[in-house]
């Protein structure tokens, strides 16, 4: 990268890192490494957040996360975790109906065993 591009990327840094080419280059390279790493970590973090939200919603109705997801898979309801967490947060009545469907499917599987 040329010096002008490095200084442009270093805009907003503190101290010499925004003015001095050598310090700016080191900081920009490290910032790009962090950005690359964290774009991948963000996907893991978001999945964990969705699972926590779904678990909180299901526990309000007396079902845990694993039973809920198992029941949904038995009923062939193909909603992903992101959509389920949004439903749990913004549409509690719809989510309750999903929990009820899942509970029925899970108990039927449990009684067959």
Image (cartoon, rainbow, N blue to C red):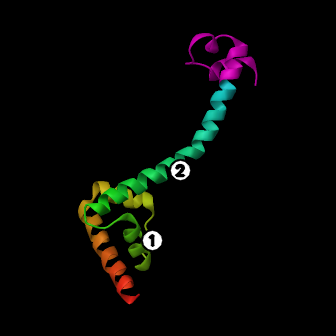
Q: Residue 84 in the image: state x and y as whole percent.
A: 38, 61
Q: Point out the residue furthest to the front here.
A: 113
Q: On residue 78, which mark appears?
A: 1
| Quarter of image, res 60 | bottom left
| Quarter of image, res 26 | top right
Residue at image coords 63%, 10%: 16
| Quarter of image, res 74 | bottom left
Q: Give the magenta range.
A: 1-27
Q: How many numbered tags mark residues here?
A: 2
Classify residue 6 as left or right of residue 14. right
Q: Residue 64 in the image: state x and y as whole percent.
A: 34, 65
Residue at image coords 30%, 54%: 89
Task: Return the residue at label 2.
Answer: 44
Label 1: state its secondary structure. Answer: loop
Check if residue 18 falls in the magenta segment: yes
Cα gap from disc 1 to disc 2, whole angstroms: 20 Å
Label 2: state its secondary structure. Answer: helix
Q: Point out the residue furthest to the right here.
A: 2
Q: On residue 18, which mark appears?
A: none
Mark 1 vs mark 2: which is more N-terminal? 2
Classify residue 11 as left or right of residue 67. right
Residue 5 seen anywhere in this rendered image of the structure: no
Task: Quadrant for the N terminus, please.
Answer: top right
Q: Residue 50 in the image: state x and y as whole percent.
A: 42, 54
Front-most of residues 67 and 82: 67
Task: Quadrant for the C terminus, please.
Answer: bottom left
**Circle 1 or circle 2, nearest the eye:** 2
Q: In this view, does 60 lie above or below 15?
A: below
Q: Residue 51 in the image: state x and y as whole percent.
A: 42, 57
Q: Do the residues labelled 1 and 2 touch (CB within 8 Å)?
A: no
């Amino acid at each position: 990268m040329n010096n002008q591009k490095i200084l442009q990327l270093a805009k907003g840094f503190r101290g010499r890192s925004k003015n001095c080419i050598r310090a700016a280059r080191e900081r920009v390279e490290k910032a790009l490494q962090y950005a690359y790493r964290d774009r991948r970590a963000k996907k893991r973090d978001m999945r964990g957040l969705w699972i926590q939200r779904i678990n909180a919603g299901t526990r309000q109705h007396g079902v845990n996360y694993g039973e809920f997801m198992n029941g949904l898979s038995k009923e062939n309801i193909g909603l992903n975790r992101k959509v389920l967490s949004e439903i749990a947060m913004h549409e509690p009545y719809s989510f309750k109906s999903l929990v009820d469907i899942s509970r029925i499917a899970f108990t039927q599987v449990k009684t067959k065993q």
